[in-house]
Amino acid sequence: MSARVAKWLAWSLFGLFVGLAAATPVLVAVRHGNASDALVAIGIGFALVGALVASRHPTNAVGWLLLVAAVALGLDTFMTVYVSRASLPGAAFAGWFSSWLLFVWLYLPALFLTLVFPAGRLLSRRWRTVVWLGVGAVAANVVGTAFAPGVLDISADRPIRNPLGVEGPVGRALPWVSGAGEVLAGAALVLGGLCLVLRLRRSRGRERQQVTWFAYVCMLALVPFVVLVWVSVLAGDQDAPWLNALALIAWWSLVVLILVGLPSAIGIAILRHQLYDIAVVINRTLVYGALTLTLGASYLGSVLLLQVVLNPLTQGSGLAVAVSTLAVAGLFRPARRRIQLVVDRRFFRHKYDAARTLQAFGSRLRDQLDVDALGNDLQVVVRDTMQPAHVSLWLRRADR
């Protein structure tokens, strides 16, 4: 494919997604569908980054994967809104498309991006087996869902039967096909994560920074995913409001990280925009994440403790909340400084050692009078902190 054809195709797919994203809210307003279905526009990151990568690097599979996933997401959401009014013409076939498009836009980036990122090539030929494993997972889920007999698992005014459902022994075997697809998808997902870890360990220089951006967002997305699993196990049959609120926050955090954070990281990595800022981003994430947990736990603990101690005197006047707020506000700066020191010492040892070297040099500088000794100390400090290939020091003569 020539560069001109690739650019035309990439931006045509982007235009198709934009058209679907614009038509979906209109259909929601006209047909009084669910307003949340109009959130297809949040997938604009996948489409835009995919179009930029595919048009500039046509041989890189990452851009095309993002574009296909974005278009499938747009079609799925549009069909879902369309079929919400089952009386519309062709609603049955729209529901049929919507029932299996989920596996296309969700599984494509999840199963294959970790295998080919960032250059669009596999780590080695041996990983072709994992690619075919992922293809088999997508195919099994699509076939098992698209041709399953009975009522389609979609929201509509009235139940819609699958127009292409297969009856008989074949139809009864299709749920097993879908189950096998889920097992294959889980295996491919685990192997894809292993491939990403191996690529991160083997890469150097610019490629390492690219993989770090991608791995950073993937690790962040694991946090709300684990929270959702933990809430589902803990909740069981009980209906606790705080568990529902926690699950809602975790779900939308996961959606934002996947549909916004992931394409943003891919765009930064492949288009190399602020590529080497990843160390600062990770540092700030660790510091402010730990700081938020520390201050939140301190606030809740102090509120509960002060309410128990002051309740006989204040009788629920809110004094405990006010005192806890002031205490947490005063704790912010020292806690942040302490957490920053721990993070630098544990995860960014080079930065921590460089800061200590500069501090020690500053202490010697106040007492050092010998110019030659000071010059030697300065060269040692520069070599230890900046690690240049060569260090030279020119001093101005006193008679000039």
Image (spheres, rainbow, N blue to C red):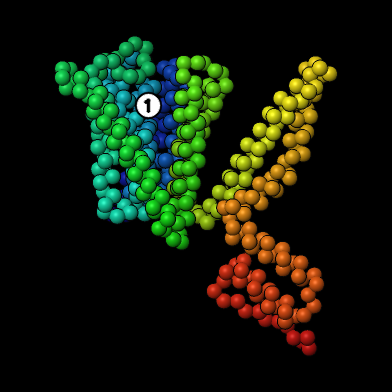
Percent x, y for residue 48? 43, 43
Tag count: 1
Q: Residue at x 70, y 48 (%)?
A: 337
- Eyeballing the image, is 153 above or below 179? above
- Eyeballing the image, is 198 above or below 74? below
Residue named by callout 1: 78
Percent x, y for residue 171? 19, 20
Assess disc 1: are there few (<14), some (14-19) or many (≥20) residues with their C-alpha within 10 Å of its C-alpha: many
Percent x, y for residue 148? 24, 21
Quarter occupied by residue 321: top right
Quarter occupied by residue 76: top left
In this rendering, position of residue 210 left or right of residue 342? left
In this rendering, position of residue 227 left or right of residue 366? left
Q: Residue furthest top?
A: 158
Q: Give, as a three-letter code, the residue at label 1.
A: Phe
Q: Residue furthest bottom?
A: 399
- Eyeballing the image, is 34 above or below 269? above
Q: Residue at x 47, y 38 (%)?
A: 222
Q: Residue at x 78, y 33 (%)?
A: 326
**Can residue 26 be seen here?**
no
Q: Nearer the viewer, residue 58 or 241?
A: 241
Q: Nearer the viewer, residue 52 or 389?
A: 389
In this rendering, position of residue 185 left or right of residue 226? left
Quadrant including the C terminus:
bottom right
Q: Residue at x 74, y 86 (%)?
A: 397
**Can residue 137 be seen here?**
yes
Q: Nearer the viewer, residue 395 or 5?
A: 395
- Eyeballing the image, is 345 above or below 9? below
Q: Residue furthest right?
A: 313
